[in-house]
Image (cartoon, rainbow, N blue to C red):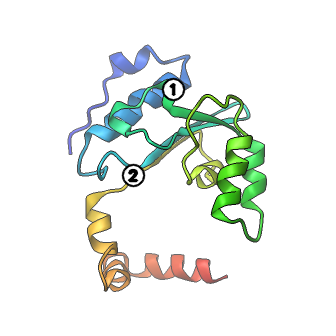
Amino acid sequence: MTSLFDDEIAAQYENDPLGMRVYTSQLLGQEKSLVLHGGGNTSVKIDNTLYVKGSGWNLDTIEKGGFSPVNLDVLLEMATRESLSDTQMVAEQRAAMSDQSFPNPSIEAILHAIIPYAFVDHTHADAVVTLTNTPNGKALIQKLYGDKFNELSEGEQQ
């Protein structure tokens, strides 16, 4: 895979993290081996706000208006709960937005909030989906990742 990242283009976003997020999201979206049908999610944390790809946007064409601004503290609190229904999660994420004119945040917003990095990329790669979305997907992934998969599985059981 050839990197499409251009240092000269990126330099114009040096003081604009959301602009950089748009630029890198579009680059990811253009790589069809990484993104299945325009899907996946990207985000950036700026101060106490998580700007996460909004529902209905494709990575290859996303603009600033496609990133939903959600209060990071609310998302982090939601991550601590023992349970949360889908309906409740969507409603609370929407209520935590600083501007209601943006689209609904991705359903993975909580996941993006707890990952300890400013920029988070989450794509739906054809290769991985091809393996996991089969009747024996778990066995294929175990074979591919070996002990690393077993360590992850044990962590999920705790």
Tally of marks: 2
Residue at position x 37%, y 39% from top?
Answer: 58
Residue at position x 54%, y 48% from top?
Answer: 106
In the rendering, at what x and y percent does residue 82 appear? 76, 71
Q: Is residue 82 left or right of residue 24?
A: right
Q: Name which residue type carries label 1.
A: Gly
Q: Residues within 10 Å of mark 2 (few under 14, many from 20)?
A: many
Residue at position x 29%, y 49% from top?
Answer: 37
Q: Name which residue type carries label 2.
A: Thr
Report the residue that reaches farthest toward the top.
Answer: 12
Q: Which residue is mark 2?
A: 123
Identify the element where label 2 is drawn: loop
* Distance in Å between CA atoms under marks 1 and 2: 20 Å
Report the residue that reaches farthest toward the left.
Answer: 1
Identify the element where label 1 is drawn: helix
Residue at position x 66%, y 31% from top?
Answer: 100
Name the image quarter holding residue 79: bottom right
The N terminus, quarter of image: top left
Q: Is 148 in front, or is 61?
A: 61
Vertical position of residue 53 compared to residue 8: above or below: below
Q: Nearer the viewer, mark 1 or mark 2?
A: 1
In the rendering, at what x and y percent does residue 80 appear? 77, 62
Q: Is residue 30 left or right of residue 24?
A: left
Name the image quarter holding residue 142: bottom left
In the rendering, at what x and y percent does residue 28 appear? 34, 40
Q: Residues within 10 Å of mark 1 (few under 14, many from 20)?
A: some
